[in-house]
Every structure is written in structure tokens, then in C-alpha cells.
Amino acid sequence: MNATAASILRFLARPVVSQLAFVILAMLLWEVAARHSTDELFTSPPSAVFAAAGDLFDDKGVMRAVVTTLWELGLSFLLAVVFGLAVGVGVGASGMTYRSLYPIILLAYAIPQITILPLFVLYFGPGPASKVAFGFSHGIFPIIVNVVAGLRTVPTGLLRSAYSMGATKQQVFRRITFPHLVPSFFTGMRLGMTATLLGVLLSELYVSSGGIGYYTELYTESFEPHNLFALTGMLALMAVFLNEVVRRAEIRHSRWR
Amino acid sequence: MNQTTTSRLIQAGFVAAVLLTWVLVTSTGLINPIFLPNPVDVMEELGQMIADGSLWADLTITLFELVLAYTAAVVSGTLIGFAVSTTRWSTRVFEPLFAAFFAIPIIVFYPLTVLYFGLGPESKIVHGGMFGFFPIALNTITGFATVDRRLLLLAASMGASPKQRFVRILFPAALPIMITGYRMGFILTFLSIIGSESIASLAGLGHRIVWYAEALETPKMFAYIVIVVLLATLLNTIVAALELRRRGA
Amino acid sequence: MAADSDSRPVTIRVEAVEHTFGGDDPAHHVRALDRISLEVFHGEMLCLIGPSGCGKSTLLNVIGGMFTPSSGRALIDGEPITRPMPAKIAYMFQESTLLPWATVLENIMVGLEFQGVAKPEREPRARVALATVNLQDFAAHFPDQLSGGMKQRVSLARALSLGTEILLMDEPFASLDEQTRMVFGEDLSQMLATTRKTIVFVTHSLAEAVFLADRVAVFTARPGSIKEIMTIDEPHPRGPDFMTTDRFARLRNSLYAQLRDEIRKAMREQQVPSTID
Ligand SMILES: Nc1ncnc2c1ncn2[C@@H]1O[C@H](COP(=O)(O)OP(=O)(O)OP(=O)(O)O)[C@@H](O)[C@H]1O
Ligand SMILES: [Mg+2]
């Protein structure tokens, strides 16, 4: 009997179990509080949010908006990766390009991009183009910075030893610079994904003709907290999922680090 | 000519080229001034805003939101982070939860914040505080959880009391990592306040940028952008200087 | 003895090599080598010993063709060295230069690939080299999974696998424990007796220098120049018996006497960091 109790406790103490238990407990408390309270802060019990989420899945307009956001994300991330890698390799290629161009990149990175969000809408219109552009402008910098770091931090000892064994420039790139760059590149992609998500969602929330920003505004103005919670939850889960995908990829490709 | 001079020249040339292009395309009418205003106009607007005092109301609101939000983030992030770090179990349970949350662009929660706290400063303070909380809490946890165990053994071997252990070993060892968190938290709080002001608000610098953008008064809009960039640079410099001072001490 | 030396063919010749580090800014100049002239005979083991920072690694780099010295030159078989010569020289660097993302076996194979060895030959040769340092069971391990000494043995295997006539070794056994070091020393001495490789070997260990070297070059404090060349007249292979002889102790002591002043000089200089910042 005692042994069973002990093993149950041990099971509960496992981090994953505790995390789940903690989340479930928080939801239960929230549910109970919402049902027993007339305070409007608590009027969205999880049960109502889940029900609303079901309705949202059936709502064609909402689903189209979510899909639009997803492909805006995908496209801006893809562009950020391609151009981030190209620029990063260009800047990190030699000591000269690094010293001359990298400070310029950092200067551009330091500008709070949120301030120029209205310009993106002015130039690219309120549709998906401005979201892709704004997401891209967020995602590209962490990728450039990490690619440059990956290229500039190859230990000189490895390079010298390769040349001492007769390596050609191409061999040095294939066997040393490139493998050394890979983990930094994936780190850049992870941070770039977080930044792209931020950029796309920011511009969606700022102005949106039929994207999710349109619906968040609709639900806020018509005071529909259940729907707003459900939509927010979906977006958050989407963000967690995408981050997890790139994080896994990063771990897989940086085992040696 | 040595390498440093060459790269400095390239950089100066780049900045000069950007500015020159900006002046040229705007004064020759190559680009519609609604899309890109003439820098001279922007400067005039800037002077005007400062002279007639119209800048101060929004600046004060933004700074007020920033101070409250950041204070809330520092206090809650440090206390909760430290509490979590005290046992291995709570670290392993809560650190991944916080990290998962930190990976979500917190901006998605902003509409909910507006729903409950309205369009005024309250929603910005709550939102900014939330953004700043995670890096501070996470770095506090990391700082305390990764203190070199050999140092703790050493302290124990020399008979350190729990208080000495904290004051002499744990805290100084965790501080550099915590300071990084405070700095990240500060930047995120600032940006999220400008961002939330841009998305839905009644006042503040971010609000004003968007306001003039929608009125197509781009010179005024750019003047406010310049203010925010300058403010960001100034605040960052101050924070970096404080960080250096703490590190040096 | 001098007559004996002269009769052997010279493999490496260093002619008045001088080197100053420091690029654009004269305030950061560091004079590392001061007109060094030196010969290394075919099949000889030459040890370089001297205070830390006196320029031993710098000289090895010049011989390895890693950079051109400020003045003077180094020659191999009468041919000036201007770039790495992987067909003739294998270089074991002071710091670990194993690729952290490659396994032990891959690390050795990459060296052979760099040297231009045909693909099918690489793996068998790498395995043979691994066996010579008794690490065949660790072929699939990554460098991080090995101890410091094992890593050094992999580096040695990689250098040996290249099959060059000349080996440049920069403190190869510095991170090994004393016993393993002695065993390695014996193996190296055995190798010298059988294969007649030409080796330049940097060490900080007096005993290692006396045990291994045919000649020991003693460096002065920086800027490094050669203070004295000591001959150790004892045929390879040398065994543990050699170490217990009176002659060994005498040689070791006279080497120490040569070095002691230079080390004090180097220490005094390091208290006044005139050249750094
Ligand atoms: N790339 C470099 N740039 C500037 N100075 C250098 C460089 N490499 C070496 N030096 C300087 O040249 C001097 C000689 O260095 P070297 O590495 O040859 O010494 P060493 O005799 O091998 O020392 P140790 O026994 O500690 O390995 C040192 O004072 C060092 O500071
Ligand atoms: Mg050295």
C-alpha cells in the first residue's frame, strides 16, 4: 500500500507529468473561478473556450484567415532563410567584408522595426504582401547574424592543420567551414522563426483585410472573449509547434557542439 | 592605408550614400513625398514638435508605461525565477514551461489584454510586463541553477552559513546571467509597448506614428520614428552602461 | 662530433630566420624570432626547448610553411619552403585540431583526403594508423568522448597516417600522464630506430628532451634565438635503462642549467608587458 503511494508520488514528480498536472490544475481553477464569479475577467471558462474553438474550426472565414497567416509565415520565413544565408555568407566570407559590412548590418538591426510598420502597409498595401515583407524584415537579421558568427568563429587551429595536410580551399570549405557553420545556421533559423512569427503577427494585428487580425479586432469590438481566447490559443499553439519543429532541427544538426 | 581605415571608409561611404540618395530622390520628386518625405521636412517637423511641446504628452505616456511595465517585469521575474530555481524539481518543471511561453510571440495575447484592460495605458503595462517577464525569469532560473557546484562545495567545506552562501557565492555567480536577462527584458518591454501602442491605443509614441501614417502626414510620422529610434538608442546606451558598471563591480 | 654531424645529409635548413608579429600597428609588434639558423639532419630527432613564449611554435610554423617569416628562409631538401608541403611534412599542432563533428576514424580519413590519397585507400590506412596508437576500438567515437591523452594519440595517428618523411610535433605529449608519456617516448624511439623519420619536437620536459633527442636546441627568452645545441649521443631505440644512467642525469642537469637563466629572464620580462597593449 505504502509502496504504491510512493510510486504514484514518484510518477507525479516526473517533470512532464508535473507540467501536465500543473496546466490541468490551472485550467480547473480557472473553470471553477469563472463559473462562480460574475467578474467579467473570468467569463471565459476553458469549457466555453474549447466549445468556441470547435465553432471556429467550422467557420470558413476564420479558417481561411488562419491558412493565409500560415502561408504568409511560410513565405516570409523561406525568403528570410534564403536571403539571410546569402547575405550572411557574403558578409562573413572574408575579414574585409566582415569589418566593412557587418557594422552596417548591426546598425540596421538596431532600428526598432515596429516603428516602420506603417511604412510597410503604405508601400505594400494592407494585404498579405506587407505581412510577408514585415515578417521577412524581422526574420532575416538573426539568420544573418548567426551565419556570420558561424563563419567567423572557425578555430584557426583547424584551418592551419587542414592546410598543413594539403587541403585545397574547396576542401577546407566542405570539411571545415561548412560543418562548422551548420549549427549556427540552425540557431539562426530558430531565432529567425521566432522573429518572423512576431513580424507577421504584429502586422496582422495592426491592419488586416481578411486575415486573423480582422477577426481578433472583430471579437474585441463585439466583446466575444470565448472566440478571442480560442483564436489566440490556436495561434499560440501554432507558434509553439513551429518553434518546436525548428528547435528539433537545430538540436539534430548541432550534436557535436 | 591599413584595413581598419578601409572598412571605416566603406561604412562612412555607405551611410553617406544612403543619406544622399534619400535627399536626392525626395528633392527631385522621384518618389512621392507621401511615401518618403524629404529629410529637411522631417527635421522641421521635429523642431516644431519640440518647440510647441506637442511631443511631451505622448513621450510622457510611453515612458510612464515603460517604467511601470519594466518594474513589474523585474520584480515578478526575479522573485518567481528565484523561487523556481530553489529546487531541482521546480526548475525542471517550470523552466521548460516558461521557455515554451517565451517562444510564443506574446503579441498574440495583446487583443485579449485590450479586451480586458481597455485601450488606455493599463493594457500596455500588462502587455509590456508580460513580454519582459519571461527573459528575466528564465535568466534568473539559469543564473541560479547553473552556479558551479564546486564553488558551493568549497563554501560548504569552509563552513559558510546559508546567508553567506547566498551573498558570497550564489548571488554573485548568478548576477551576470541575470543582468543579461534584465537587458533583454528591457528591450522587449520597450519594443512591445511601442508595438502595442501602434496596434490599438489612444496615445503614446507608437500611437502617434500610426496616427500620422493613416493621415498620410509622413513627415510628422518620420519625425516620431526618429524620436523612437533616438529614445531606443539612448535607453540602450544607459542600460548597457549600467550593465558594464555592475559587471565591473 | 661535429665531423660526424657534417657527414649526414641535411633535411631541414633554417637560414637567419627572423619574425615579428603585429601587422599595421607598431605598438603591437612582438619580435618572436631573432635570426635563427639551424640544420636538421636526415633521420634525426631534434628537440626544441625554451621558456614559454620564446618562439618555438613560431619556428615550427615557419618550417611547416604556415607563414613566411619577416626575413630569412627555411629549406627542405634544398628547396625553399613557401607553403605547406603535405607530401613531405606532417604537423602535429600544440592545440587539438581534431574536427569535433567527425569521428576518430573520419578525422584520420579527412587528413588523407586533404593529402590527396585516393578514396579506397583512406579507410584501410586510417585503421592501420589507429591500431599503431591502440585506439582501434574508438574508431566511431567523437573527440569529445575521449580523454585528453586519447585525443593526442588520435592526432599522432593522423600525423603518422600521412606517411611523411618529416614530422613536426609541437608539445604532442603535454597533456599525457607521465607513465603514458614514457611509453610513448619509447615507442617513438623505436620508430626512429626503424623508420628513420626526421622529427622536430617541441617539449617543456627536460627528461623527455634528453630521452628522445639526438640533439637538443635550447632557446633564449623572447625574441628566441638558439643559445646552445646539446648532442645526446645514444643510439635509438632507447629504453628505460637509459633513464637510470648517470649520464642521463648529468645531461638533464646541464640542460636545466642552460635553461634556468633564460626562464628567469622570460619571467622578468613578463612582469613588464611593454609589447602588449
Ligand atoms: N599570431 C600572433 N600574433 C601576435 N603575436 C604572436 C602570434 N603568435 C605568437 N605570438 C607571440 O610570439 C611569441 C612566441 O610565440 P610562440 O607561440 O612561438 O611561443 P612558444 O615558444 O611556442 O611558447 P609555448 O611554449 O608557451 O607554446 C609569443 O610572445 C606570442 O605572444
Ligand atoms: Mg608553443
Image: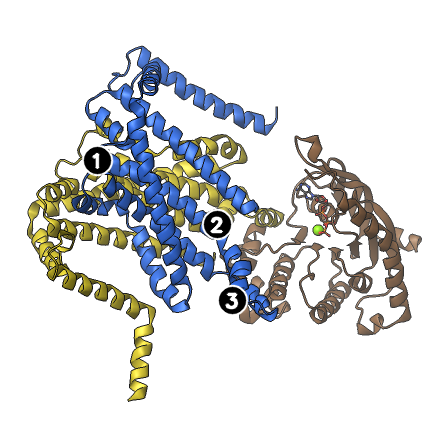
Which residue is tagged 3? B162
> In this rendering, would B114 be left or right of B88?
left
Instruction: Tell us which disc is closer to us: 1 or 3.
Output: 3
Q: Position of residue C160 (x, y in %)?
A: 65, 60
Q: Can residue A136 be seen from the camera position used here?
A: no
Do tags 1 and 3 sit on the same chain? Answer: yes
Q: What mark, if any, has residue B190 been given in the picture? A: none
> Chain A's colour?
yellow
In the rendered image, which residue does mark 1 sit on? B201
Residue nearest the observer in this picture, C3 or B38: B38
Q: Which mark is residue A180?
A: 2
Instruction: Relative to B33, say whether A241 is above or below.
Output: below
Determine the chain carrying the residue at label 3.
B
Task: Report the amino acid beneath label 1.
Answer: Ser
Chain letter of mark 1 equals B
| Mark 3 nearby-residue class (10 Å; few <14, some 14–19, many ≥20) | few
Cα distance in 3D space between marks 2 and 1 = 46 Å
Q: Secondary structure at mark 3?
A: helix
As drawn, the residue found furthest toward the bottom would be A1
Residue C78 % position (x, y): 77, 43
For chain B, give the colour: blue
- The Cα–Cα distance between marks 1 and 3, rounded to whole angstroms, is 48 Å
Horizontally, residue C80 falls left or right of residue B48, namely: right
